[in-house]
Every structure is written in structure tokens, then in C-alpha cells.
Amino acid sequence: MSTTLQALGLSKSYNDVLIVDHVDFSAEAGRITVIVGPNGAGKTTLFNCLSGVEPIDAGVVLHRGDDVTGWSPDALSRRGLARTFQRSSVFPTLTVSDNLRVAAENHGRRGILRGVVGMRDPGRRRAVRTVRTVLAELGLSAIADVRAAVLPSGTLRLVELGRALCGQPDTLLLDEPASGLDDAETEEFHQLLHRLAARELAVVMVEHDLELVDETADVVYVMDAGRVVAVGPPGDVLGRSDVQARLFGHLIDRPLDQAP
Amino acid sequence: MLTLELALAGLGIGSIAALAGLGLLVTYRLTGVFNLAFGAIAMAAAYLLWQAVRVWHWPLALAAVVDVLVICPIFGVLLERFVFRPLQRRAAAPAEKLVASLGVFVVLLGGAVLVWGAQARLDAPSLVPYRQLPLPGGVQLPLSTVVDLAVIIVVGIGLALGQRTRLGLRVRAVVEQRELAELQGLDANRVAALGWAIGSMLAGVAGVLMAPTLRLQPYGLTLVMLETMAVVVVAQLTSPVRAIAAGLMVGVIQAELARVHLGGYSGALFDALTANLFVVALLVALLIVRRLNETGGDDAGTTARLTTRGELASARGWWLVPALTLAAPLMFNAQDRRVALAVPALAIVLVSIVVVSGYSGQISLGQAGFAGLGALIAARLAAGTMPGFGRIPGVAVLVMVPLLMVPIGLLLGWPAIRRRGLFLALTTFAFSVAVSRFVFDQPSVTSGLTVHPPDAFGSDNNFYVLELLCLAAAFLVVRNLHNGRVGRALIAVRDDESGALACGVDVRRLKLLVFAASAALAALGGALLAMGSRAFDTGAFDPTRGLIWFAAVVVFGIDSAPGAVIGAGVLVALDAGLPQGSSILVIGLCALLLGRMPGGLLHSMHRLFDHTVRRIAPGIVPDVRQRPTRAVQLTPAGRAMVGQLRRRAAGGQGVTP
């Protein structure tokens, strides 16, 4: 088993408030790593730092052993680090298959000028094949030619995941991928995650539904106030009383069905 | 060395800039619209006062009160109700609001010229009697400056205090998150109307106070708009204190520098810089300021909402319309054909805006700068006076011009990498202003230039064919930028920049590419425009031209290249058939109606046509709304989704989720 993505001593602050506080993190190929924690714990910011969306203040990010600290998000994506967003970032004017195709075509960056003068993209066939495979895998083939603007949000989640897969990543960062899915969809979605992990992908996700975390996760990171407060298999970590206090202490003031 | 006298004179200019800037800032904060028409409303208010006092012989005080406190606010309320409310209702992009305010600007300007004429009036009634206040040290301060400063302070304090009141809070809520504010039970329409009333009242105050000092002349206020922009940008659209300080400081520095005289070429440059110090300030501020505190949500940056979002597939044979537009002049008589020479050239310029703003979502108001530079370079290359180049013969000029323009386009693309929305719009506009002031207005650069079509294409007919060939080449590039891999990636950048980055799209490189391509196209169009009219007319490439072109492209469909061709045809035809300037008025009126025709004029007509035909004769025309879907084996998830979609469609919901 190999580590695909690793962060050491990662820190990020806004206006002198530490949002991510010396976090050590690693994602293993073939494993599902889940980050849990109350709102404001810094989970999304950690994702943003790992994927290059936000510059980090201190620490190192390693991808397949290479130092990629400070790399731009597009460069990281081409290296095999794919992510999805908490708020859908699907391209509304493109069809579902074109959405995927953007990602399938851009892990080779050359050929922009070639396109301007009207030459065919040499990777075209491979991109089309990748898109078709991913569409079939996610059950999206029937709506391949539908514009994303008209799709319901649960479907958009799948489109976004498909887009991430089209870059042929070795690491997937999924920010609350199951929000907006109904129970059946969620169940299917988690089976899909297991299939992906079985393909030696490192799957990292932020998830709030602890029951599902318990079922699917191989490793759980518990974050609170910017720090990683516990790491380990879900059975060990989620049962700990200090972890429960951190997770439920914040949620207990509100009815659970309204908790995000 | 500073002198007090000059400093006080500078204070006069500075206080006007600060006053106008403060007004624009307040309007922006109150309405969330960067009101390009601010100067025009000020101008109209000043003219109304003149009309009332000098023509109708009303008492000055009464006229001023009616003008500023009654007519201006009512005008603001009308603007909100009929122009900006429909835009707000469908959460229009800032680009659309910008264009709508441009429409107001154009209509007011055109109206003022029509009613009062373009000549300057020297007898603008002054609310403040002309008096010089003696200060210690023998210098004198005009009373009007004192009044200007007093008004500035009052407005500044009012703004600072107003933000803390309940009403101020409501206004902010409506500007920042209109829907949420409405859900909280706020009557957003009334709050917005109030914002517009106050905003245009401030414009009226500024106009009435400025008119005696500046000349009362319709176009003169475009100038004030520019100076005002510098002030507002320094303030990052937020800080009234910084706006006031910036206005006063630039005014004083300008007055002090006017004393310094240098000889030679550097002297001419220095004089140009001094005379346009507000433009310099605008440029410097735009480059230094890291962000503007724009109102509204995250989606504020793109022009994606301006587009049709691919709602209707284009009808078969649609391209025949622009093709016929272009072919018709070949059968015109000589005189009409000479007029029509402008059509393909203008079409190339408009298409350059489609590329940068429609396809990739980057607002560019600076295309007039590129087009003008293209014309200039073409003239100089043909004459052999371009530094570093010999005399370039004939058609080769038309190949060289776009190529030489690429680095300049890259230069403007660079700041565009990090800037979006209004910030980018202002940056590109400032570029065009700088080019106009520091290049086109310099006699040493542009005097004595002649332009004419390449020798082999001297006759109008041949030149028209040459233009068509250039347009065809331009369309090839445009097609490659819209289709295939590059086209998809550009749309991805337009629709969602962070999503595009996550897909591995090299957004930086694409933006540079699209600005370079757009600059090259605009330059080619500009060169052809100048060749067709056989003159290098700097007025044809004035920054306000760029604004009008942008508005025209938005009106004719920002992501439609055929629309740009039709737009060029309509513009040229209107100008040829009707009194000068009427095309601008038409574009302005259409821009005002944008709220009611999302996706532009042609798209709205198309939709109307489509709708009517399907009403009258269902089944005869294919439903362009539905694209055929392939028959595939569905997985359970796929079936569930298709079912969901069907239910949505059956529920009769609109196309937006």
C-alpha cells in the first residue's frame, strides 16, 4: 500500500485566525479516508490547501513523494489529484458528457495553439473513450446530451464526481459528496466509492453522516478547531468519548435532523 | 516646491472629482450597480436647471429645489422600476447591469444633444455666488470650492452614519443578498428604489454644483466620469474617506505639476501625463489595488448569465441571415457600397468582443484601444514610419497588424488573470482610455497619417471582397475558439473558474490566449475600418466607442458570432440612414430593455418566433429545445434520474432548476 497524498505541518490562517493548525495528513491508495468534524473545523480549508486552491502559510504537501507545495490547482489536477466542491461547480451551459470531456482532455496541457489553428487534438479518441466509460459507470449515459443547467442537484453531484474521475486521478478529494442524495442514491454512491478504492484510488472525503462513515471509512480523521484530534479506523476512533464530545457537543444544541 | 495658490486651485478641481466620486460610491453601495450613467444624470440635471432658470425664468432657488429634490429622485425611481428591477429579478450578472447603466448614459447623452445641442453653454446658473474668500498670506479661495468641500463632508458623514441605521442595514442587506433579504420580509423593491432615488439625487447635486466650473456641454461629462472612476477605484468602492482624499490629492498634485515645464519629447510626455493625471491615477490604482469590494454573491464575476446558456439550439439555415447581410452590399450602388465598407470591419471588431466576453466570460470594455492601435499600426506600416520596420507593402500589412497586436493583448491579459467582473471591466476600460490619451491624442504620433486600402484593392468592390476574406479568416479562428477542446475549456472557464481549474484546465494560459486572439481580431477590424474610411480618425476609436460596441454585442447576443455580424450591419445602416448618432440611441434603448430580453435581442426574437410557430403549427417544426438522446441500457441510478427528469418536465417547470 502506498501513500499518494501527504501533508506535513500544514497551517493556514485568515486574519491571524488559524483555520488549519499544523495538520499532518496522509491518504493511502486503495483506502477510503474520511474527515469528520463540526462545522468550522477547517475541513474544507484543508481540502483547499491540499488541492492548491488556497496558498498555505506553513507546511509541506507531497504527492507521490514529490513536493508539490504551492502548485496551482490545475497543475495538481493534471498530476492526478482530483477534487469536487461542496457547492456544485458543474459547467451549466455544457452537456453532461462535455462536462466530463473538459476534464478528460485537459490532463495533457499541450495543444491549445494547435486547437486555435484548427488541428485535431491527438488525444481526442482516448478522451471520448474515457468519458463513455465513466458515464456508463456512474449511470449517466442516458443523460449524456442533457445540459447540466436543467439537472437536479443530486445528479450534479454525480456529474461532478464523473468529471473528477475523467482526469484519471490517483487521489480523489470529495467535499461532502453525499449531500443532496436520497437514501437509495447514497447507498449506491458508497458502493461506488468502494469500487473506486478497490481500483487502488485514494479516496478522501468530508462526510457528516457518521453512520455511513462507520460503514465505509478505512481511516477517520477527526478535526476540531483546525487540529486533527484523532486518527484511526472508525471503530476505534468514533467510539472514543472525547471524539464524541467534540462531534456531538456541537450538534446537540440543534435537533439532529437539521444538522448539516 | 509647493505654492499655496496652486494648491487651492487644485483643491477646486479635486473637490469636484471627490464630490462626483463620492456620489458614484454612494450610488454603488446603495444599488449594487456601478452606474456609468452617473455623469450623464449629473449633466441632465445641470441642463434642466439651465432650462428652468435661463429659458423659463424660474427663481434660481425654486428651480434648484425642484430639479435636485424632485425630478432627480423621481428619475432614479423610474430607473429602478423599469430598467434595473427586471434585471435584479432574474439575478442578472453585473455585466448586464453595467450595460444597462451604459444604456441610460447613452440615451441621456443622445437626448441632451437632441434637445440642447452639442455646443457648450457658458451661462450655467450658479447656486453659489462668485466670491473669493481672502485667506491670510494674500491668497484667495473661491466660495464655490468651500461649498463643494462642505457638501463632500456632509455626504461623507451622512454615508458613515447612514450605514449604522436600521435603514442603512436594510439597504445593505438588499444590495448584498436580495433574495435572503426578501425572505426576511424586506420589501426589496422599495429599498432599491430608495437607493436609486438618493443616488440620482447626489448625481443631480454634483451636476448642478459642477456645471458653472466645468462647461455645460453634453460630452464634457464623459470626462468627469473618467476622473470619478479613479477616485472610486482608489477607495476600493468602499471607503468614502479615501475617495475624498484621493480626489483632493490628485487635484492638488495636478495643479502643482502644471507649473513644471520640460522641453523636448519627454516634456510632451510629461505634459500629457500631467494633463491626464486622473487617468494615470486610475491606471496606477487599478494595478496596485488588489481587490475591489464588490457587492453581491460569488457568481458576480462572469458573463455566463448574459449568454443564452444554449437554451435553444440554433435553427437550421440561421447563418443565412448574416451571410445575406454581408453579400448584399456587392449589389449596392457605389455610394451605398462605400458606406457598407464599414460593415465587415466592424463585424470583426464586434466578433473580437464575442470571443473574449461571450465565449470565455471576461468583460472587456477596451476593444476600442486595440482597434485604434491596429489602425495606427496599419497606417504607419504602410507609410514606413513604424519604428523598427521598413515599408510594408499592400496586403502584408493586414497580416502584420494582428501579429504585432498579440503581445499587447497578452499584456492586457496578464492583469485579467486575477481580475474578474467589474474590476476587469474597469481595468480594460482604463487601458483604452490610456491608449486614447497617451497615444491617439499625441500629435507626434498621429498627425499627418494617411490610410488607404492596399493598392491592389483600391476599388471599393475589391476592397469589400478583401474585407470579406479577412472576416472569413477571423471566423475560422473564432470557430476554433468556440468548438472542440479549446472551446469547451473556454466555456468551462466562463461557467465556473474554480471548476475549470479542478479539471486541470490551464486557466491562466487560456485567458492570455483569448485576450491575445481578441486583441489581434480587434486590431484587424480597426485597420480595415480606417482603410475603408481612408482616414485615421481618433474619434472613431474613442474609449466611449468601446463601451458602445460592448453594449451592441450584448444586445445582439454576447456569445453569438453571427449576431455580431448582424449587429455591425444594423449599426452601419442606422448611421447611414438616420441622423448621426441614432445608432447609439437605438443600442442604448435596447440596452435599457435587456432586463426583458435575456440572452439579447436576436435570441429573444428567436424564442418568440419559436414559441409562436409551435403554437400555431405544432409538429411542423422540430422542437429545438430537446436534443435527441441515445438509446442506451440504463443502470438503476440512470433510470431513477431519467424518471426524475421526466417528472420535472411534466411538472411544467422552467429550464432553470
Image (cartoon, rainbow, N blue to C red):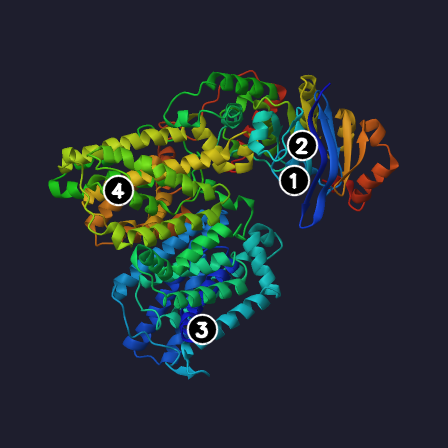
Q: What is the chain letter for disc 4?
A: B
Q: Are marks 1 and 2 on the same chain?
A: yes
Residue B560 horizontal/vertical position (percent): 36, 36
Residue B167 horizontal side relative to residue B263, left or right? right
Name the residue tied to disc 3. Answer: B148
Which label sits in the foreground, 2 or 4? 4
Name the residue tied to disc 1. Answer: A56
For residue B555, above or below residue B64: above
Q: Are marks 4 and 1 on the same chain?
A: no
- Circle 1 Cα neighbour tier, 10 Å, few/some/many (<14 / 14–19 / ≥20): many
Q: CA distance from mark 1 to mark 3?
A: 48 Å
Residue B435 horizontal/vertical position (percent): 34, 50
> Label 1 amino acid?
Ile
- Circle 4 Cα neighbour tier, 10 Å, few/some/many (<14 / 14–19 / ≥20): some
The disc, 4 or 3, on the residue closer to the chain's N-terminal end is: 3
Q: What is the chain letter for disc 1?
A: A
Q: Which mark is residue A61?
A: 2
> Label 2 amino acid?
Val
Residue at 53%, 26% in the rendered image:
A103
> Label 3 amino acid?
Asp
Name the residue tied to disc 4. Answer: B386
The one nearer the camera, B525 or A89, is B525
For residue B324, above or below residue B29: above
